[in-house]
Amino acid sequence: MMDERLILFCRCRARHETAGWVEAARIVESQHETCRFILDDLCGLCAEDPGKISNLVNGARQVLLIACHSRAVKLLLHNAGVDDVEKFLFFNLLEQDPAILMTVIGDFIGEKMTIPSCGNPGTTLLQSNLSWPAWYPVIDDSRCNRCGQCADFCLFGVYRKSGDNVTVTHPQNCKNNCPACARICPAVAIVFPKYSEGGAIGGSEGFDERSEIQRMQQDTDEILGNDIYQALEQRRMKRRSIIREDSLQKAITERDEALKQAGSSGEAS
């Protein structure tokens, strides 16, 4: 039976060596009687195995999630099929002092509450692809105006634009530490949870709207120049060229492998 109160800690492969995360890990791991799970990387799990996250939290009445900016985390959860965020308490290690985490956990559990036994307390959920840094964008649908500029700009097929809908379909294609599509988003609707400088791009809750719009306009001028439409068309043409080259290389690789197998079969006979 799942504990009514569940503690999740995102170890975050991008930040796990920082002081705040090290201290938080020590505190969470000391909670032997509570039902708590250490997530190897919330971003990676939400992209590669979202069902694992939704199944984990669905049985809990309340969840304490210790991670980064709550806006970014809520978007990750939404992509994993978890929308009942009202039952979540978020502890933001980027802005809150980990020294108070023990008190927060104590208040969350309740000193006089009898905590049911958890099946596997402290279980670590590992991301299947440990070589992938899980750097990718999530879209804030409450801000997105469906212009599709991100899809036109991206050279690597991370986004898909279909009719009036824009989605992140291939997060693994995103290039590590590249937030350029978020910089030029006219609605400031793209978030990179692992972005280190915060603000709207990093998923901060209380960003300055006017400053972010000014920043976006400056970034757009620097990245795309004066003729945005021409620049985006050039990006689209370049993306098609990259896709053709990738397809050709894949075909050559498959052909060579087939010839190799045929040769081996001939030798065996």
Image (cartoon, rainbow, N blue to C red):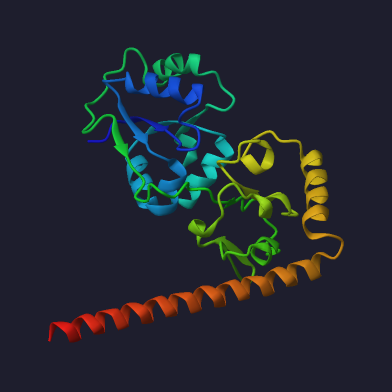
Q: Could you tell me which residue is drawn at 14 percent across and 82 percent down? A: 268
Is 257 on the left-hand or right-hand side of 267?
A: right
Q: Is residue 237 visible?
A: yes
- Hey, which residue is sitting farthest left in the picture? 269
- Give how far across and how far down residue 157 sits, in percent: 57, 66
Q: Could you tell me which residue is drawn at 41 percent across and 21 percent down? A: 108
Please name whichever residue, 155 or 36, is drawn nearer the observer in this view of the structure.
155
Q: Is residue 143 visible?
A: no
Could you tell me how many numbered marks the image carries?
Answer: 0
Please name whichever residue, 222 or 193, is drawn nearer the observer in this view of the structure.
222
- Give how far across and how far down residue 207 sits, in percent: 71, 36
Query: What is the quadrant of the N terminus in the image?
Result: top left
Q: Could you tell me which residue is drawn at 70 percent across and 63 percent down? A: 149
Above or below, comparing residue 173 to residue 22 in the picture: below
- Hey, which residue is sitting farthest right in the picture? 226
Please name whichever residue, 140 or 42, is drawn nearer the observer in this view of the structure.
42
- Give how far across and how far down residue 156 sits, in percent: 58, 64
Is 193 on the left-hand or right-hand side of 255?
A: right
Please name whichever residue, 60 or 204, is drawn nearer the observer in this view of the structure.
204
Q: Could you tell me which residue is drawn at 68 percent across and 33 percent down? A: 206
Above or below, comparing residue 25 to residue 79 in the picture: above
Is 224 on the left-hand or right-hand side of 152?
A: right
Is 172 on the left-hand or right-hand side of 226?
A: left
- Give how far across and how far down residue 193 sits, in percent: 56, 42
Query: What is the quadrant of the C terminus in the image?
Result: bottom left
Above or below, comparing residue 71 to residue 251 in the picture: above
